[in-house]
Amino acid sequence: MAKNSTAADTYVWEGMNKQGKRSKGEVSGSTLALVKADLRRQGITPLKVKKKPKPLFGKRKKRITAGDIAIFSRQLATMMAAGVPMVQSFEIVGKGHENPSMQDLIMAVKADVESGSSLAESLAKHPLYFDDLYCSLVHAGEQAGILETLLDKIATYKEKVEAIKGKIKKALFYPAAIVVVAFVITAILLIFVIPQFEDMFSSFGADLPALTKAVIVMSKIFQEWWWAIFGGIGLAIYGLVQLKRRSRKFNHAMDAMVLKLPIIGDIITKATIARFARTLSTMFAAGMPLVEAMETVANASGNYVYTQAILGMRDEVATGQQINVSMKETGLFPNMVVQMLAIGEETGSVDAMLSKVADFYEEEVDNMVDGLSSLLEPVIMAVLGVLIGGLVVAMYLPIFKMGEAI
């Protein structure tokens, strides 16, 4: 079985430098032969090279995130723009990264480049981290001899896309977190607090208010069936996650439904348009053919409804139709986007116009997320007040009635 290409080990070496002096150190590499070849390129004659044993309780490797790839892209672009050779840039960036998993990935790509592969081919061996868009842009940069420029554009693109993803997550996380907290507090009250009041009320011998009776019934249900309630919620969440991972039809239905949600749907729509504009602008700037670029853009849109619409636009553009005309026919893009693209096609500045569209919609998403947070705060406080306050009032109603009777 082949070894995972992302694996890179640390080797301890001893050797003679150009001055004939004995020296030693450590270096990362995927194989012993490549490490020795790397040492010879540095003017060191290796005398003894062996793999460094890994500690029994070493650092736990962290997952490689899209943010890690964005940071790597910016660092590599900066290094190469400063005139640092590619292999040396990988060495510097890799050793300086805090995530051991990312270090392994960078060193594996470096080893492939050293063995004669192009950067695009080396990155394509790790599709989980470098998608078709990333590899296509790097390949275009290598072919045109402007790799440093394209790496800078890729870095900017990745940073912008990750920023807008972060805003979407922020918009969805806050209300979801409050719902979870409200459910947990309610469950604690029903399981542990309400039974104490129930024992006290049973000694009164008086008829309880309807609201109090309803809360006591809910409490008994939670006490007896708490395992089924929490288990059912857990299974439902697990089932949704598995459906999202495995069912294309479910994902398509969810994508269409999300766009129709109030407020959230508008945010997702604007974020998708921003991503479309940013991606197409970057690929245009790289000199990629429009039809090929639109296929990649469709796959990167992040929403099935827009993916299908963009693929339809690609087919119409392939027959000679202007992109702004096919865009208008989809009915999914605002008139401002269509008009700006039309101006870009007339003036030969499509990439610049799309970049302006992306900037505008990214700012719109930012403002809407901030506005949503401000809007949700009083609504959530009111819901929590009614929910928790209703339980408290239900428990104290019998006590108030007793006070009136006295």
Image (tube, rainbow, N blue to C red):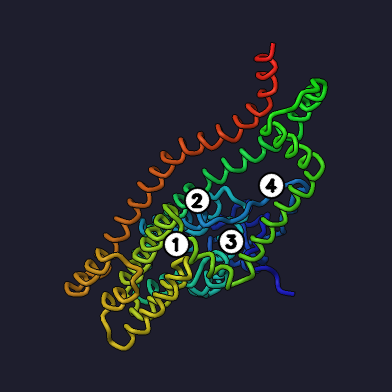
N-terminal of the pair, mark 1 or mark 2, is: 2
Which residue matches tag 1?
259
Q: Nearer the viewer, mark 3 or mark 2?
A: 2
N-terminal of the pair, mark 3 or mark 2, is: 3
Q: Secondary structure at mark 2?
A: helix
- Spatial CA distance of label 3 from label 4 is 16 Å
Is residue 280 or residue 219 the one in the foreground?
219
N-terminal of the pair, mark 1 or mark 4, is: 4
Q: Is residue 54 above or below residue 201?
A: below
**Outermost residue, left side:** 347
- Spatial CA distance of label 1 from label 4 is 42 Å
N-terminal of the pair, mark 1 or mark 3, is: 3
**Outermost residue, bottom side:** 319
The amino acid at mark 2 is Lys
N-terminal of the pair, mark 4 or mark 2, is: 4
Q: Is residue 265 left or right of residue 353?
A: right
Decide: few, some or many residues near mark 4? Use Cα within 10 Å; few <14, some 14-19, many ≥20. few
Q: Is residue 145 left or right of residue 221?
A: left
The amino acid at mark 3 is Leu
Which residue matches tag 4?
59
Estimate the x, y position of residue 131 in percent, counting from the top left.
50, 69
Residue 105 disc label: 3
